[in-house]
Amino acid sequence: MNADREPHSPSRRALIGTRRRRSLTAVALQVAAASATAFAGPAFAQDEVPRPPTLPEVPAAEPPEQEPDRIDLLEERIAMLTERLEKSEEERRKNVSSLSWNGYVDFGFFAPIGNRGAGWVQDFGNLQFPQYSNYSWTFLGDILATAVNTRGEVADLGDPPGITRFDSINSDGGAGFLVNEINLRPKYLLSENAIMRASLNFTPRSGENFALGDFFDADLAELEYLVTKDGKTSFFAGKILPVFGIEYKERKSDQRFAITPSLVARYTTGSQLGLKIRSRLLDDWLLLAAAVTNNSSTIESFHFYSEVDKNIGKTLNGRGAISIPVGRAFGNTDRLEIGLSGEWGPQDRATNNAGKIWFAGVDLQYLGTSYTLKAQGLEGRAPGRAEEGVWGLDLKPSGYVELDWQILALIGFSVRAEIRNALVTLGSERIYVTKEARYTGGLRIVVGPHIAVKIEYLHNDEYGGVRDFRNDVFTSSLVLAL
């Protein structure tokens, strides 16, 4: 140890410790000041309010996907269902035959009451109508008044002098059973717009002299072409239904509510050979139909019909109707229909166009849910031509009113009142004077969708100078429909 160095005294050591603590304090202050300056930096230098420290930026989260609109979903589902239905319908059409059948068997019982089943009598010596004494024969009544079925066949045509007629029933006043008609109506879908229809009637009747009495006739053979997609305008060609009036729509047993046709049906329900167009317009408010044909709309068994023309002229036919919805506000589907009809052309069987036959008519229908009220009136003229066997006609205003009411699902009834006022002549050889009033009541029993039983009583009255004679008919019909 150095002798010159004195050992530290306690006071000296305390002084040295104090100095060291001061030095360390100063260093700490300097470090703190530097740190503060570093943090403040330019912010304090520019006398700005210091901002709080910011956190690191985090990428913004993408917004969640919005759920599809429910309406859009519904529309998509509806479109998918519609497509499936269309495919299903297309498959169904492929599997369904293009050929279909309608028809019926009509079997009945009838009983003529008076005059041996005939609807006329002869005016011998013109005692009742002397003004017609210039005719060789004068007949009174209505030859088709004693109808027994929907075909309009009568119990008996009688035996008039000077002429031979085909009497299909010829009961001679007897009562009995009768197969009125067997009808078959094929329909074939030629394409989406073209339909073929036919109607064949088979009529079993009594034969004689080793000959069968059965016969058949084809009363419909037509093409219907749908001109518009909605099917409301159609074009027809062939042996077609007439357009005159309303009764032709019910000329078949499975279509007619009751049994027998009206007294004026002979003028309006016959098939015609030619062309026809029919249309429903203005939301079915307006109905229009027109046809050009060889023959008139009289029935084939009557005097004024010939399917094949012997002259170059053609018969013009037309009907227009207004169909008014009734009670739509109450939720029913009733309609009131009012129509006008007309027909004009050369006389059937005539060899030239000199004489014209014409008919004009008005009709009314109230089509209810369970009942139908119908009325039709008409008149017409034809000059005739005796040398060619063409009959003359003077049809004064005639017609009928009918109510058909299905009271219950099982039972319905029908009532009809009608008149026919006509003169039918063949030169000066013969004249039929008809002033007939007929009252018909009927009952309809629906056994099932394919079976109906009908009962009807026809009471005939003569008026206007024709002496009344008894020529009523009771008839019935069992219709078995396909």
Image: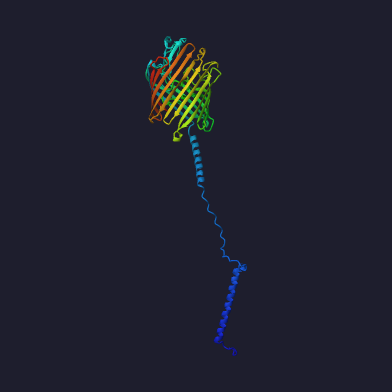
Colour mapping used in the image: rainbow
Q: Is residue 415 visible?
A: yes
Front position in the image: 46 or 292:
46
Front position in the image: 478 or 87:
478
Q: Which quadrant of the figure contains the N terminus? A: bottom right
Residue 165 x/y as whole percent: 45, 15
Residue 475 x/y as whole percent: 38, 22
Which corner quadrant of the image does residue 168 belong to?
A: top left
Count of number-bearing discs: 0
Residue 437 x/y as whole percent: 42, 19
Vertical side of 94 occupied by 133: above or below: above
Residue furthest out toward the bottom: 3
Q: Is residue 275 visible?
A: no
Residue 236 x/y as whole percent: 52, 26
Vertical side of 457 occupied by 193: above or below: below
Q: Which quadrant of the figure contains the C terminus? A: top left
Q: Taking 408 as reference, is 396 left or right? A: right
Vertical side of 27 occupied by 198: above or below: above
